[in-house]
Amino acid sequence: MRMLINVPETVVADALRGMAAAHPELAVDVENRVIVRRDAPVAGKVGLVSGGGSGHEPLHGGFVGFGMLDGACPGEVFTSPVPDQMVRAAAAVDSGEGVLFIVKNYTGDVLNFDMAAELAEDEGVRLGKVLVNDDVAVTDSLYTAGRRGTGATLFVEKIAGAAAEERAPLERVEAIGRQVNESSRSFGVALSACSTPSKGGPTFDLPSGELELGIGIHGEPGRERRPMMTSREIADFAVDAVLEDLRPSGPVIALVNGMGATPLLELYGFNAEVQRVLAERDVAVARTLVGNYVTSLDMAGTSVTLCQVDEELLRLWDAPVQTPALRWGR
Amino acid sequence: MLDAEFFRRWLAAVAVSVDREADRLTELDSAIGDADHGSNLKRGFTAVAAVLEKEPPATPGAVLMLAGRQLVSTVGGASGPLYGTLLRRTGKALGDDAEVTPGQLAEALRTGVAAVAQLGGAKAGDKTMLDALEPAVAALGDSTESFAAAREAAEQGASDTVPLQARKGRASYLGERSIGHQDPGATSSALLLAALADTAEGAA
């Protein structure tokens, strides 16, 4: 095992202690596993709370700050947080204007956030919810668990976060979040399996020379395995899979996301291919973001997320943001 | 008759067997899920055993409700709410009696299992914990001897998940590739029933 850890049991707490030391602008409750803006609750502002299993850093804690999330709840590695964390986070960020839960569509996340919503509403917090389900790899209607939530989570958190920062009311922030989700689709590719601390090794067997098409972000294998493809071939496959479902009629924001173990050298090269395919398909790209944002520990690979935007969404995307992992305009 | 102490011993026995089988559960989960079922349940049932030791409730219903709440607060994932709901709803159905009959427990467990099915939106055959729980509660009658039959039924139900294709939970994303692996949730459910039978037999 080659991991920079002490013991698997303390991985999340250790990371939170380090995060607290690096980011005094955040209030990190290591014991209860809640990360909030130090200035929360922000007067007159809807509070945005997201959360999910750890191991997807910088998602979600790295997106807490001005213009994006007010709070984040990290669960155990690849395990959704528990309702207690979400209730604490909601109470900490509620200025009286209500709280929006942003939930990735995984069974555990949904069940725990639903339980938390009931408890928080009992305590008088007004709640909205956006369910993110952008992954086109899971389309079979037989799977009523539905599509997984992956890269579009960043778009929802950034754009709805900007709307909240402008003091839009809860119903409006929620509607924008849903619009962003409905306008976004993703497709992921793994070149290697990830390793979880508790397992101490790869969570599935992917021989070198092969890749998995259609992976999610929890290390779960994809739907199809093929011999290794070039960056050009992967871009063709991934972008076409997204476009087949999204069929954009206007410009898009493109996210070329690394899964954790793929260097920027490769991601930028892959982005060149993604931009080529989009140009060939006559899709205008308004903005592009390249980097490791929604990761799967040390998995090598990438995901492509496209979000079709109108003027309003693009303006909110460009609005200032200041978080550990995403920062511009301020 | 079964009193609060019996239920406390049952859940302590579950904690012991989940601790012993944690690596196996995680291994099963790594084949078709995300490799955390064992460590998650171990964390949860260790917390359950600790809280029941520290502040033992007076009735069987209260034992199960406290244990369920503890699971919801410590496990996370899907198994936290699902197992938490199983125990809380079973406990609620038992009411305030200081002692319950095996038949009452059987009836309450059927209520708990129905609540799990509703929360997860799953049914038997979907390759989930219900594949062990449903045959087990069907086998339960009004004697502690029937607990052994429930243990057998749960273990059979768990091994019967091997050829199934998952239709719920994270394994469902694998489609046909989930075939050939035993479901980790059904496996942990079988541990729960085995501990019940063991406790009734005084073996735990």
Image: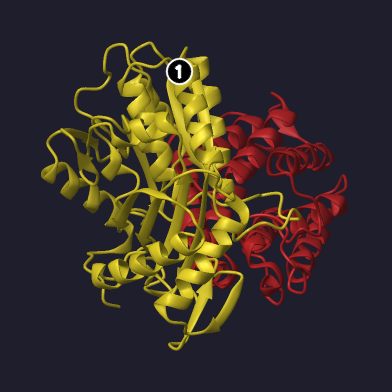
Does residue A192 show up? no
Q: Which residue is mark 1?
A: A170
Question: Is residue B198 or residue A202 the one in the foreground?
Answer: A202
Res A43 quadrant in image: top left
The hue of chain B in the figure is red
Does residue A314 show up? yes
Tell me residue A239's x, y (percent). 50, 63
Horizontally, residue A257 falls left or right of residue B23, namely left
Chain letter for mark 1, please.
A
Q: Quadrant of the C terminus of chain B?
A: bottom right
Res A251 quadrant in image: top left
Q: Answer few, some or many: residues within 10 Å of disc 1's Cα (few below 14, many 20 plus, some between 14 and 19).
A: many
Residue drawn at 25 percent across, 41 percent down: A30
In the rendered view, tell whether residue B92 sits above or below residue B32.
above
Tell me residue A139's x, y (percent). 67, 56
Residue drawn at 51 percent across, 17 percent down: A121
Tell me residue B28's x, y (percent). 58, 71
Mark 1 falls on what kind of element? helix
Among the chains pictured, the one given yellow colouring is A
Q: Amino acid at mark 1?
A: Leu
In the rendered view, tell whether residue B139 sits above or below residue B26.
above
Horizontally, residue B171 falls left or right of residue A8, namely right
In the rendered view, tell whether residue B108 sits above or below residue A47.
below
Q: Quadrant of the N terminus of chain B?
A: top right
Tell me residue A56's x, y (percent). 36, 55
Residue drawn at 71 percent across, 55 percent down: A143
